Image (spheres, helix red, strand yellow):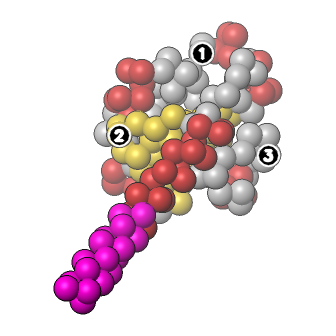
Amino acid sequence: MGGGRTAATVVLGGAAAMLLVMVAPAAVQRARDRMDQTVRYPSGAAAKADRAEVPRWLPDSATGIAFLAPGEQGERLIRATLPGRALPADCTPASPAPDPHLRAHWFPTDTPRRATAHCGQYDVALVGDRLYGWRGAPAAAGACTAGPTG
């Protein structure tokens, strides 16, 4: 009988450990998102439907959206996976841009050195199929004439 209990304890302990390993990363991500006020969406269409601040140039078919717009200053960060590894057609070529003041755990710190385009009021870098975009406070100051979502 004692051997059966030991085996059951080992199996239950192993199952609990596996559950912890599977659930812990998602819980950590949710906690970090709450701390930096990140919101996530499954698609560009869902993000634009929920938040007017999400740039209109973001393709509806983009996936894995992470968006940070913490206050009224107008600074923004966005990350999205783009189908076809191509920037939206209305983006224009640009040089590396100044670092954004905002920080998020999902936004690599070397991204500004990789900037290759402007999309609306955002500087953007396309790394593989991942788009990283940021808009600083100076760009946001011009948003009064250019519209809220540039």
The residue depicted at 71 percent of the width and 60 percent of the height is 110
Near-viewer residue (104 or 35): 35
**Labels 3 and 2 touching (C-beta < 8 A):** no
| The N terminus, quarter of image | bottom left
Left or right of residue 57: residue 148: right
Disc marking residue 42 = 2
Earlier sequence position, callout 3 versus callout 2? 2
Verify whether residue 2 appears in magenta.
yes
Q: Does the segment drawn in magenta span residue 116?
A: no
Residue that carries the numbered disc 3 in the rendered image: 98
User: At which x and y percent is residue 146?
Assistant: 63, 15
Structural crowding at the residue carrying mark 2, measured as other residues with C-alpha within 10 Å and reported as few (<14), some (14–19) or many (≥20): some
In the image, the segment drawn in magenta is 1-20
Residues 29 and 143: in front is 29
> Residue lying furthest front in this view?
1
Residue type beneath disc 2? Pro
Residue 83 point in image, percent of width and height: 33, 50
The amino acid type found where label 1 is placed reads Pro
Residue at mark 1 to residue at mark 2: CA–CA distance? 22 Å
In this view, 148 is above or below 69:
above
- Which quarter of the picture shows residue 142? top right
Q: Which mark is residue 148?
A: 1
Q: Is residue 100 left or right of residue 93?
A: right
Q: Could you tell me which secondary element the residue under label 2 belongs to?
A: strand
Give the amino acid at mark 3.
Pro
Q: Of residues 12 and 100, which is closer to you in this image?
A: 12
Q: Are marks 3 and 1 in contact (CB under 8 Å)?
A: no
The residue depicted at 63 percent of the width and 29 percent of the height is 69
| Residue located 50% across and 17% down the image | 52
